[in-house]
Image (tube, grey):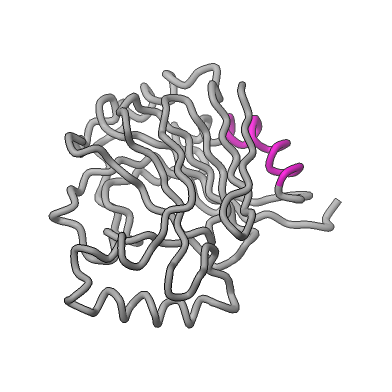
Amino acid sequence: MEVEVHEIGRSKSKVIIIDDFLTSAQDAVDAAAALPAFPPEGRTAYPGRRHQIGPGDKASSCVMDILKTAGPLIQSHYNADDFRVLEASYSLVTIPPEKMSPRQRVPHYDWDDPDYLAIMLHLHRVPHTGTAFYRHVASDLEQVRHDTVTEFRKQAQAELSNPVSTGATLNTHYEQIFQVEGCFNRLVIYPGCLLHSGYFPPDFSYSCDPRTGRLTANVFILTARGSG
């Protein structure tokens, strides 16, 4: 494994990148391909399809491998004594930009708790796609936390509701501060309160097939301190 730790933006938020993460990454792809077709994501604004991984699921071994290997890095770099899993899934981006809602076309945060971490393992070989991180220009926020979420939502919604900014929202209202390309078997860990968005090449296929699409394994955890 090759580990890089980046402190990004003015907030010096830690983003961890680990290459050659799993010894059995192709097995994780095969397990995803053996599942029934992923259903469309209906709970969040994720622009695609997801297979939720719960206890006893055939794909749960992939989640355990991710947590077992990444656990020590999470504990040391995010000052975490312990953590618990909130959600895990296989995910495929399948909705092209012209069919996305305005909300899906701008950066987002996962949760306003700085102890909430997103873990994403890239299980595809689609080039020139990954995750970019942003600063919201009007609020100067890179992280959306408990004490700033109300004001951020108000400003972001006003921007989305302004027809003048439609089509230029990303460039006008958000400044990119960092990006991570999604290479096969690369794991990325970052605080879920960071503003971020996926990026895709012009010829991206938006495939629903785990063997050819932008397949990722996503795990969301909540860290805790002072428990051991």
Find residue 7 and report its horizontal and vertical position in percent.
Answer: 63, 47
Region of the chain picked out in magenta, as a range: 64-77
**How would you classify the magenta stretch by its main secondary structure?**
helix
Q: Nearer the viewer, residue 120 or 102?
A: 102
- Residue 115, compared with residue 228, is above or below; it is below
- Give me the residue at 56% from left, 25% from top: 21
- The question of residue 71 being in magenta is answered with yes
Find residue 227 and report its horizontal and vertical position in percent.
Answer: 83, 55
- Residue 11, compared with residue 118, is above or below; it is below
Find residue 68 and report its horizontal and vertical position in percent.
Answer: 65, 32
Residue 108 lies in what quarter of the image?
A: bottom left
Find residue 1 and report its horizontal and vertical position in percent.
Answer: 61, 21
Q: Nearer the viewer, residue 178 or 148?
A: 178
- Give me the residue at 18% from left, 76% from top: 164
- The question of residue 200 being in magenta is answered with no
- Residue 56, compared with residue 154, is above or below; it is above
Q: Is residue 125 left or right of residue 99?
A: right
- Give me the residue at 56% from left, 48% from top: 190
- Give me the residue at 17% from left, 76% from top: 163
